[in-house]
Image: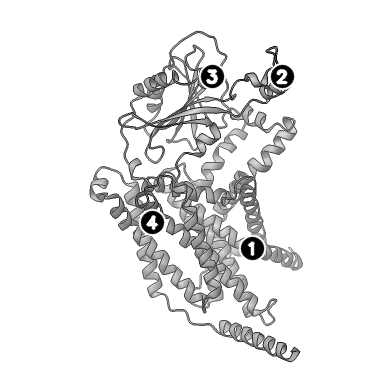
């Protein structure tokens, strides 16, 4: 490739990194943490779900039959059952749903009893799904909570925690749909563009796979580090960028486009065709639905099976079907096991298994490939380490761009501009790490200190306030290098504090917990402790930053400019 083309690609590579680098770091770092959010961090954050009693499937079937008599008949169109499980729901939840909404009322009918034009339109469009939710204690099976209303409202009122918060932040930056998903999807595309341009720019990068010279100069360390992270993580970064772009853009761009082409713009029809559970043809032949038998069979599908939920269609009819959501084992994607009314097993398929050809398989692996939740703790650990490398890739690129600009004979921008940009990087990137680590003590303080189980609804305040405060502080401190070092100590302290906070707040005996085989919460405590101590030791051994020659020059230039402005103002007066 000609040098002129390489230069253009380098310019494109640089500008993409400058514009999106900080956001890419934020998304990648929170993504690395999100890998362990469910169920590991969720278990740590909620001691009550670390151990749960074994599910009595016969009792579940009995509760469904008992409470079905307490809701309107059309609420039995669809019954959702969410089992209590470690790392998941702490209560047994049974939801009766009328997914076609409430029937047409007299207000929608004419005087003669016929449906008015408005009533016919309402029936055609269907009212929003409504339902009633019952939550039960997983040990005593006593009713804990009852909620009725729109299904969207029922699901919106379910309690969330720090694990849910960080996953949602990674997915859409808490900007919601479509803005948030569109933003993260576009960032995935820009990351793919950076990877492609980086490959062409560093054509001889394979020859530098093992080249890392941290002691020669700061510039060489950044250059070698950026190349090494890029080439060693090339495959992983490409997969993460592609799957991230797909997951971000699928709902806001790809689904509407596919619906426009094949379904006349009807997105609901598209989703229903490929993912919705089909409604059975009701025979009006009364027959009890063997919910307990279906659950029992699902629990025996394989040794590592995780039974999450059940959807019952046509409850109480001979044509009823039960769809049990399962995960675990050798299957990368979550699956659905189908049962007839009498509990007879019919088939098992993945989420998109009904789509013919390889398309369904590709769609099924998108989410597991992005979050690494398909091969146990080892795969998650690999995904987290590689994810941190993905976060360092744009960060080292930004730092390298600034270093080259400062050392250039004729810098393209003023020294003050480089300094402000450096402060923005320190505040934004260091701030997001501190804010994320702050979630651990905040979770326990809100849940146990304030007695609020819905931590996710308010944990965003300390998260965003601390992040913003650090960004502002980065522009106010004298030396950003000293400030970055102080942030590292804060991060180390927060990591070390995770174990004592868990012991103090929950009163858990770790030896008893480990002896009982409950390793996840203890594992998070010990890993955070080890990382905190290592970071503390690393910063102790790291030389104290001194104001560099460039920094001195920058400060002198800024001071001279301020002095010149004051002199000019006096002369003007």
**Considering only order in the chain, which callout, 3 or 4, is on the residue closer to the N terminus?**
3
Residue marked by disc 2: 116
Q: CA distance from mark 4 to mark 3?
A: 45 Å
Q: Relative to 244, is 136 above or below?
A: above
Image quarter for residue 536?
A: bottom left
Q: Is residue 42 above or below residue 77?
A: below
Q: Nearer the viewer, mark 1 or mark 3?
A: 3
Which secondary structure, mark 2? loop
Q: Please tell me which of labels 1 and 3 falls first in the chain.
A: 1
Classify the position of the N terminus by image quarter. bottom right
Q: Mark 3: which secondary structure?
A: helix
Closer to the observer: label 4 or label 3? Answer: 3
**Along the polypeptide, which appears first: circle 2 or circle 4?**
2
Residue at the location (51% across, 42% down)?
Answer: 368
Residue picked out by circle 1: 17
Quarter of the view holding residue 89: top left
Circle 2 packing at 10 Å, graded few (<14), some (14-19), many (20+), is some
> What residue is pinned by disc 4?
441
């Amino acid at each position: 490739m000609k040098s002129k083309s390489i230069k253009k690609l380098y310019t494109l590579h640089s500008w993409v990194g400058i514009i999106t680098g900080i956001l890419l770091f934020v998304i990648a770092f929170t993504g690395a943490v999100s890998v362990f959010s469910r169920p590991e961090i969720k278990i740590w954050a909620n001691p009550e779900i670390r151990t749960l009693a074994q599910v009595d499937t016969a009792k579940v079937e009995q509760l469904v039959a008992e409470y079905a008599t307490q809701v309107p008949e059309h609420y039995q169109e669809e019954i959702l059952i969410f089992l209590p499980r470690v790392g998941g729901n702490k209560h047994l939840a049974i939801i009766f749903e009328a997914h076609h909404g409430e029937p047409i009322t007299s207000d929608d009918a004419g005087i003669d009893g016929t449906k008015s034009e408005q009533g016919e339109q309402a029936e055609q469009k269907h009212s929003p799904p409504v339902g009633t939710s019952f939550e039960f204690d997983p040990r005593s099976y006593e009713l804990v909570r009852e909620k009725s209303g729109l299904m969207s409202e029922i699901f919106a009122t379910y309690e969330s925690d720090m694990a849910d918060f960080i996953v949602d932040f990674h997915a859409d930056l808490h900007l919601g749909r479509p803005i948030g998903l569109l933003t993260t999807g576009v960032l995935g595309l820009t990351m793919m563009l950076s990877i492609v341009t980086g490959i062409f720019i560093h054509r001889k990068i394979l020859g530098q796979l093992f080249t890392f010279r941290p002691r020669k100069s700061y510039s060489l360390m950044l250059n070698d580090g950026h190349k090494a992270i890029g080439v060693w993580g090339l495959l992983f970064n490409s997969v993460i960028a592609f799957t991230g772009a797909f997951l971000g853009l699928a709902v806001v761009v790809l689904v509407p486009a596919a619906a426009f082409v094949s379904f006349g713009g009807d997105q609901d029809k598209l989703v229903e065709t490929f993912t919705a559970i089909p409604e059975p043809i009701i025979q009006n032949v009364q027959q009890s639905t063997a919910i307990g038998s279906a659950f029992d069979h699902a629990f025996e599908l394989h040794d590592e099976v995780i039974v999450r939920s059940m959807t019952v269609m046509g409850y109480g009819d001979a044509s009823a079907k039960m769809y049990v959501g399962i995960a675990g084992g050798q299957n990368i994607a979550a699956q659905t096991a189908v049962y007839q009314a009498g509990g007879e097993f019919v088939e098992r398929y993945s989420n998109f298994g009904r789509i013919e050809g390889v398309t369904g398989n590709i769609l099924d692996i998108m989410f597991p490939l992005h979050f690494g939740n398909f091969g146990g703790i080892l795969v998650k650990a690999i995904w987290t380490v590689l994810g941190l490398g993905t976060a360092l890739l744009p960060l080292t690129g930004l730092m390298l761009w600034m270093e080259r600009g400062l050392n250039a004979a004729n810098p393209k921008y003023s020294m003050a501009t480089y300094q402000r940009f450096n402060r923005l990087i320190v505040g934004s990137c260091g701030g997001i790490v501190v804010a994320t680590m702050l979630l651990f003590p905040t979770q326990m303080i809100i849940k146990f200190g304030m007695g609020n189980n819905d931590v996710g609804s308010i944990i965003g305040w300390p998260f965003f306030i601390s992040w913003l405060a650090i960004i502002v502080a980065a522009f106010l401190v004298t030396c950003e290098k000293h400030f970055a070092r102080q942030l590292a100590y804060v991060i180390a302290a927060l990591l070390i504090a995770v174990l004592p906070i868990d012991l103090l707040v929950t009163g858990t005996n770790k030896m008893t917990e480990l002896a009982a085989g409950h390793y996840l919460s203890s594992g998070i405590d010990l890993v955070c402790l080890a990382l905190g101590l290592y970071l503390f030791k690393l910063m102790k051994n790291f030389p104290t930053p001194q104001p560099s020659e460039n920094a001195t020059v920058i400060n002198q230039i800024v001071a001279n400019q301020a002095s010149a402005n004051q002199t000019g103002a006096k002369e003007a007066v």
